[in-house]
């Protein structure tokens, strides 16, 4: 009989604890919802900023690649001009 009573008490305590976890003051719930919205908006803003930075990085990477290609072309032209000037043109 005492084991049945113990189980009943344990069940009653568990029910009370569970009910206590399910209910919070309205002000606390509202504050939590407001904070969740603010964090969600901040997250969206950070994601948009990250995407903008990725686009900018790709643009700068393309500009760097083109500049390196242009520099290589100018260096080749300079080298060719020097060879022609010295009379040692290589074909």
Image: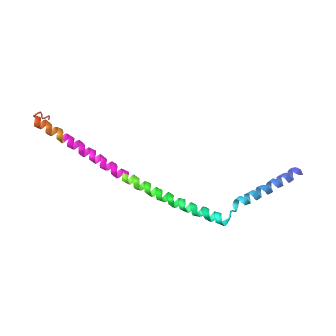
Say which residue appears at 11% left-offset and 37% top-offset.
Answer: 84
What type of secondary structure mainly makes up the magenta span? helix
**Furthest-right residue in this view:** 1
Number of marks drawn? 0
Q: Quadrant of the C terminus?
A: top left
Tell me where residue 89 sits by quadrant: top left
Residue drawn at 59 percent across, 63 percent down = 33
Q: Position of residue 78 (x, y in %)?
A: 17, 40
Above or below: residue 77 compared with residue 48:
above
Q: Which residues are drawn in magenta?
A: 57-76
Q: Residue at x 84, y 52 (%)?
A: 6
As drawn, is 42 to the left or to the right of 59?
A: right
Task: Tell me how the rendering is colored.
Answer: rainbow
Which quadrant would residue 77 be assigned to in this image? top left
Q: Is residue 65 above or below residue 14?
A: above
Give x and y (percent) for residue 85: 11, 37
Residue 61 placement (x, y as % from top left)? 34, 48
Query: Measuring 24% from the left and 46% from the top, which residue is drawn there?
Result: 70
Q: Is 26 situated left or right of 56 in this image?
A: right
The reply, left or right, for residue 32 in relation to residue 5 is left
Residue 72 lies in magenta, yes or no? yes
Q: Is residue 53 magenta?
A: no
């Amino acid at each position: 009989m005492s084991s049945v009573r113990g189980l009943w008490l344990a069940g009653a305590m568990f029910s009370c604890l569970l009910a206590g976890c399910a209910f919070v003051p309205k002000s606390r719930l509202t504050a939590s919802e407001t904070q969740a919205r603010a964090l969600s908006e901040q997250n969206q803003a950070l994601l948009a900023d990250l995407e903008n930075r990725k686009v900018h990085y790709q643009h700068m990477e393309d500009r760097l690649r083109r500049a390196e290609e242009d520099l290589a072309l100018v260096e080749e032209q300079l080298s060719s001009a020097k060879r022609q000037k010295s009379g040692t043109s290589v074909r």
